[in-house]
Image: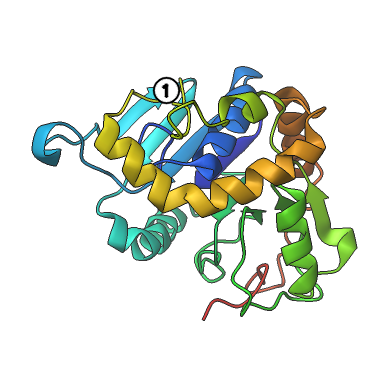
């Protein structure tokens, strides 16, 4: 059994969640169904009339332990604090075998917070970031567009694992006749205000990924989850003499 910690800017039930959260959910729920232990760490959010309700801080959904840390603007700081406290409480052995970092523009700065191998799952990348030519391990590209962005950043091809969106996403993300993206059945139905907000927030990213996923329609979610799990299972153990593990790229 593998113990996997995933950091993501939202969870898939957040009304503002988009394709990156859907991808992570589809992959991780399949890995959890195989008996692996998954923890999903993300910020909290508000729902309901006047945004007056918050979801539970801790709950298990689809076999995934979801931990919501707090306000979204504190997410990066709290992710580092979470790992630091985890390391303090686990002096004898690492509580997780791998950490997945959901990267939309830039990765989390976690290098000095943990000795656990970090695998970035890249959906988009800031053009100003430059990759380490000798990273500590593999990097997962969630689309061919993400793969090209990694190559432009200077990351050698041999470190890139392409695990594209599953074929079901191609049908689920098509626009309906009203021109609004179809609802994701894995999260609660949102009103028109939420749909318009998601359209503006993720419209550009969705359009790019929809075109990109059109070239990988034969890939299934099971195959994508298998690629991600195989990447985790093939990780090399960290070298004890190294005081810090480098990560994908420096974070400005």
Q: Is residue 64 above or below residue 155?
A: above
Residue 44 location in percent, x, y?
A: 28, 44
Front position in the image: 86 or 33: 33
Which residue is located at x 63 percent, y 23 percent?
A: 30
Q: How many marks?
A: 1
Left or right of residue 188, residue 131 in this image: right
The quarter of the rendered structure image containing the N terminus is top right
Which residue is located at x 41 percent, y 44 percent?
A: 199
Q: Is residue 239 visible?
A: no
Left or right of residue 102, residue 227 in this image: right
Front position in the image: 111 or 184: 184
Q: Is residue 64 visible?
A: yes
Left or right of residue 59, residue 63 in this image: right
Location of residue 198 (image quadrant): top left
Residue 226 location in percent, x, y?
A: 77, 30
Location of residue 71 (image quadrant): bottom left
Front position in the image: 169 or 160: 169
Among all residues in the image, which is located at the extreme front?
177
Residue 97 location in percent, x, y?
A: 64, 44
Q: Count residues near mark 1 (Cα–Cα under 10 Å), then give few for <14, some for 14-19, many for 20+.
A: few
Location of residue 244 (image quadrant): bottom right
Which residue is located at x 19 percent, y 36 percent?
A: 54
Residue 28 location in percent, x, y?
A: 59, 31
Report the residue marked by disc 1: 61
Which residue is located at x 59 percent, y 37 percent?
A: 23
Q: Is residue 56 above or below residue 34?
A: below
Q: Is residue 153 above or below residue 98?
A: below
């Amino acid at each position: 059994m593998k113990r996997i910690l995933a950091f993501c800017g939202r969870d898939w039930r957040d009304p503002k969640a988009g394709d990156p959260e859907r991808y992570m959910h589809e992959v991780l729920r399949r890995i959890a169904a195989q008996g692996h232990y998954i923890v999903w760490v993300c910020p909290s959010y508000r729902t309901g009339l006047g945004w007056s309700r918050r979801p539970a801080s801790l709950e298990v959904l689809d076999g995934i332990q979801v931990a919501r840390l707090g306000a979204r603007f504190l997410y990066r700081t709290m992710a580092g604090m979470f790992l630091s406290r985890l390391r303090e409480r686990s002096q004898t052995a690492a509580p997780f075998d791998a950490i997945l970092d959901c990267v939309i523009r830039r990765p989390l700065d976690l290098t000095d917070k943990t000795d656990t191998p970090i695998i970035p799952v890249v959906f988009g990348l800031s053009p100003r970031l430059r990759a380490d030519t000798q990273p500590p391990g593999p990097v997962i590209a969630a689309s061919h567009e993400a793969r090209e962005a990694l190559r432009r950043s200077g990351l050698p091809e041999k470190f890139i694992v392409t695990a594209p969106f599953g074929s079901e996403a191609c049908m689920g993300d098509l626009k309906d006749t009203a021109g609004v993206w179809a609802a994701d059945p894995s999260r609660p139905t949102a009103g028109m205000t939420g749909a318009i907000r998601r359209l503006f927030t993720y419209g550009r990213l969705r359009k790019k990924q929809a075109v990109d996923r059109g070239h990988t329609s034969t890939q299934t979610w099971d195959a994508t989850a298998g690629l991600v799990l195989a990447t985790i299972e093939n990780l090399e153990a960290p070298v004890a003499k190294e005081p810090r593990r480098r990560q994908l790229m420096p974070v400005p």
